[in-house]
Amino acid sequence: MDSSPESCACEILDTVPLLMRIIRSKVRSQTTPELSVPQFRALAFLGRNEEAMLTDLAAFLGLTLPSASKLIDGLVAAGMATREPHRTDRRRVVLALTRQGRRKYEVAVKCAGDFLAKRLARLSKSERVSLYDSMKVLHELFSDTSLGDRPQ
Amino acid sequence: MDSSPESCACEILDTVPLLMRIIRSKVRSQTTPELSVPQFRALAFLGRNEEAMLTDLAAFLGLTLPSASKLIDGLVAAGMATREPHRTDRRRVVLALTRQGRRKYEVAVKCAGDFLAKRLARLSKSERVSLYDSMKVLHELFSDTSLGDRPQ
DNA sequence: TATTGTTATACTCTATAACTATA
DNA sequence: TATAGTTATAGAGTATAACAATA
């Protein structure tokens, strides 16, 4: 069994896009047609970041400020997010999820998680231990990677 | 250390999107501004599928036929793909990569692979063995998943 | 009649440019 | 002068509808 860095990289390139397609499909089944993919990613970002401002969100999504602003228009109109002026710096807006927005996000993630867990139950205990460890290792190894991202 | 199916699913949901962002970023750095993401995915599909017809590609990309047709227009104009009439069934078109298109795809994948491999070299041998096995297991476990995909 | 694909048209998403307001 | 955000406008990308050609 080959386990060179190159072979591992190949396996990751084969497997990660497959898993991502599955996750995206399950998430979308719970959010479309209400939310676009970028809107859902915004929901996820706002769920993890308290008091985010528009510039933060735009950077995360790889969008320009005008595009992020319009995207938030949609989330606010859908009752998923709020846009408030900042208390001290009145140039900023403070973005947050509504209760409904948070719930929508949690339900979608749970749907994907349930599907994965059901499949993972087919594995042996030792396979799952190895898998769990490997995911932790990967997360640690790549969590500091900076993405030379769009927009140009 | 918890290794229930649910915990494993959580780790996958944390780690896979992170890895996917990294892979996408590296691939894009080699293909933009020439190719859009769907065009690159089309390149990958045509690289893996000989004699593909337009309907196959549209299904894989989750696009309608008109959208897939326009996307191929772009790849043909860029010299990355060819569109020929089928030999016996003259309703069909046969899609294929040009040498340049194949090369573009291989270079982009190699760039992402090199980045991953460089990082993976930091791991111990035993960590890589576990990782390699886990990727194989995941690939096997989810390779038959059908995606209830767009378009509507 | 069903299948494969294209053309015509409209809508959504995103970017650039220009602007307002605040620090 | 620099920063945070919005409005106006134009360009990609995608969908639906209507069509042509072939099986």
Image (cartoon, coloured by chain):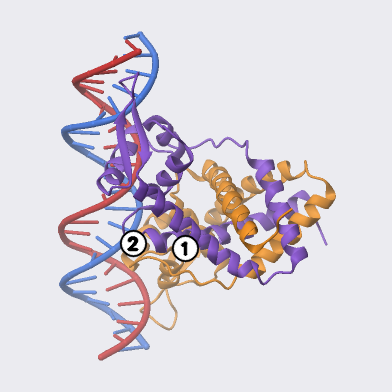
Chain colours: A purple, B orange, C red, D blue
Which three-letter amino acid code belongs to the residue tagged 1?
Lys
Residue appearing at x 69%, y 48% in the figure: A136
Task: Estimate the x, y position of residue B134 in percent, counting from the top left.
Answer: 72, 60
**Where is mark 1, residue-wise?**
A26
Which one is nearer the viewer's eye here, A74 or B104? A74
Task: Estimate the x, y position of residue A36 in percent, counting from the top left.
Answer: 35, 53
Chain of the residue where label 1 is placed in the rendered structure: A
Task: Estimate the x, y position of residue B1 in percent, counting from the top left.
Answer: 74, 53
In this picture, residue B81 sits left or right of residue A10? left
**Where is mark 2, residue-wise?**
B67
Which one is nearer the viewer's eye here, B99 or B116? B116
Which dot marks residue B1?
Answer: none
Label 1: few (<14), some (14–19) or many (≥20) C-alpha neighbours in 10 Å: many
Q: Quadrant of residue A121?
A: bottom right
**Residue B110 in sight:** yes
Chain of the residue where label 2 is placed in the rendered structure: B
Which three-letter amino acid code belongs to the residue tagged 2?
Ser
Residue appearing at x 59%, y 52% in the figure: B16
State how many labels appear.
Answer: 2
